Image (tube, rainbow, N blue to C red):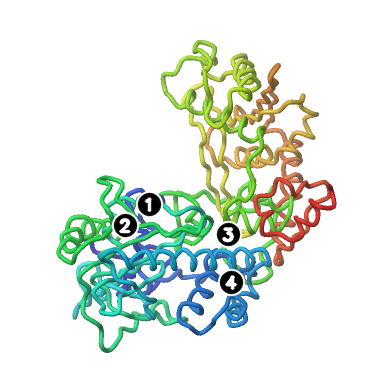
Amino acid sequence: MQPWDNPPGTVGVGRLARIPVRHLRDEEPGCPMNRALSVRRDVFAAERVSSKTPREEFPFALVQELLDQLESGAAQSIEEAMGRCRRTRSRCLPQHVTWSAAAAERYLDARRRDQESRDSVDVPRTFRAPDAWIAFRTLEEPDERGITDYERTVWGRQYVSDDATLRELVIPTKGDAKERLPLPELAAVASVLYYGTPARIPSFEHHSPALRHQAPPPRPERVRVYSAGLTEGRVRLLRTTETDAFADWTAEEIMDLHEQHVVPRLSRVLDGRDRVAGAHCAGCKVLPECSVVPRVPALLVLPPPTRPRKRRTVSVSDLRAHRDCPARYHLTRVLKLPASVQENEAVRRGRAVDGWLNARHASADASPCREVPLPAHLPGLMDDELAPALGMLRAHRARCPLDNPAATRFRPQHRVMAHDPQSDVVVIASCDLVYEERGGVVVRETKTSAFPPGGRSVLLEKHPQLALSVLLLAAGVLGGDSRRSRVELEILRPDGVSLEEFDPGDEATVEHARTVLASYTMPWSAETRYDAVPRPGYDCTGCEALSWCATGKERVAAAG
């Protein structure tokens, strides 16, 4: 247990720690300091950042409200439930509404089948619990961390049997139901269900302790944890990854699991102080003061925001999706709804080639690619699809950076973070490969194509990640001497390879990169509606959100 001092840039007393189960995962990515700050609900950023968003950004928001209406009996049909969820529905795109209605119906059908199957086994039926279960620990005086109120929470659909001896949690997932989760995570969930008291978190006072039920029920004798796949419409009792045991435990078993797996991880979350950059930085209370996230004013060539809005992250993939169609961006990049179409061969081939190259370049003592045999198989490709991919790998041998004796410190799939304080946006760049050469830094992007490349200016416009890399190098975000640094574009074809270079020290190249990036960032920054308005020439056939999009279906039908 470590004493807590508010880091620079924050204010508050730090008496309330509300800890969601996700923070106790062993594989939880992110920043220890960010987690320690985020659970201290009464510690705030000294300069408050708006949390407003023009559209609903939580994919399950409408699904959860629909299920609450239907499982409580307040509504008897999806249509009636939709009518009672007007506020949330109005914030959702029409495609999000369509997906939510279908997901809710599949969930209810899966729950019905699961409940009916219990009549032949020794498991009672369960019913919706009206209040969330929250595990409390309250102290009369602040402990060494300065905390008096500990609260542990879970997310999902909570159920209880008529006699209150069985509590269950069903965790919805957007895709197929999961089969297994790590034992520590399931133990943390079961611990909240067992020790939890029915309570409500005040809607507009999340910095205040939850309001407990005045007459809490007795603790259960048994707890079960399920996964529900909203795409396949299935409810599955989860198993532990380590032992394959079902997440179906008695009170005594849960108490043992709590001491063994939960208590140590609570300390890790509460006492974290290290800082690690990542996508979570956008929501961090100390981002303006953080030393691990470089600040690059005007990186995105955007003016300051004109209205309050939640701080955002953006990547080139986000910008490309928004240019294709604002609705596609929101549905697939923000909500991350499951893809409803299969990837084509070109996409799978590109991923397979990138994966093989990344694995080769990741080893510090790897030999050049020309010295190793080509693979007999590549993940995701059928045998009759293999030849073009092998041709690209064969062509890469002529331009493999491992052949360069001056190249050192290879970092494939290197993620770079920067904060643009002018636009208040966190920029994420995932570089195919970063390496160092004679004091400079080289960023290499590799593309697979069946056609020869166009001119240099066209390449920057076609591949905006090159423009972003030029600007990041010019700003010194990746370190190194910008006069010795460069951006490389390796274009692999089945019958050859080309390598283009872009100089971050050349003013004309930097200015062109700014112009290219601004053509993407300006429309993205100003967007508030996210309508389904595809750019001219965009083929909706391959859109991941096609199943939910009436506009896309109409365009595909019109195209024949």
Cβ atoms under marks 1 and 3 closer than 8 Å: no
Residue type highlighted by circle 4: Lys
Task: Write down the quadrant of residue 511 in the picture.
Answer: top right
Residue 345 in the figure: left or right of residue 256: right
Q: Which residue is mark 1?
A: 28
Q: Residue 320: give x, y in percent of width and height.
A: 69, 47
Marks 4 and 1, the one that precedes in the sequence: 1
Decide: is 250 above or below 128.
above
Residue 91 in the image: above or below residue 183:
below
Between the C-alphas of marks 4 and 3, the distance is 16 Å
- Residue at 64 percent of width and 28 percent of height: 488
For mark 4, what is the residue? 52
The amino acid beneath tag 3 is: Leu
Q: Are discs 2 and 1 less than 8 Å apart at CB?
A: yes
- Name the element at disc 4: loop
Foreground: 359 or 438? Answer: 359
Image vertical order of residue 11 relative to residue 439, above or below = below
Whole-Å distance between the Cαs marked 1 and 3?
Answer: 20 Å
What amino acid is labelled 2 in the image?
Leu
Give coordinates of residue 11: x percent, y percent.
40, 72
- Residue 172 visible in the shown view: yes
User: Pointer 2: what residue?
Assistant: 24
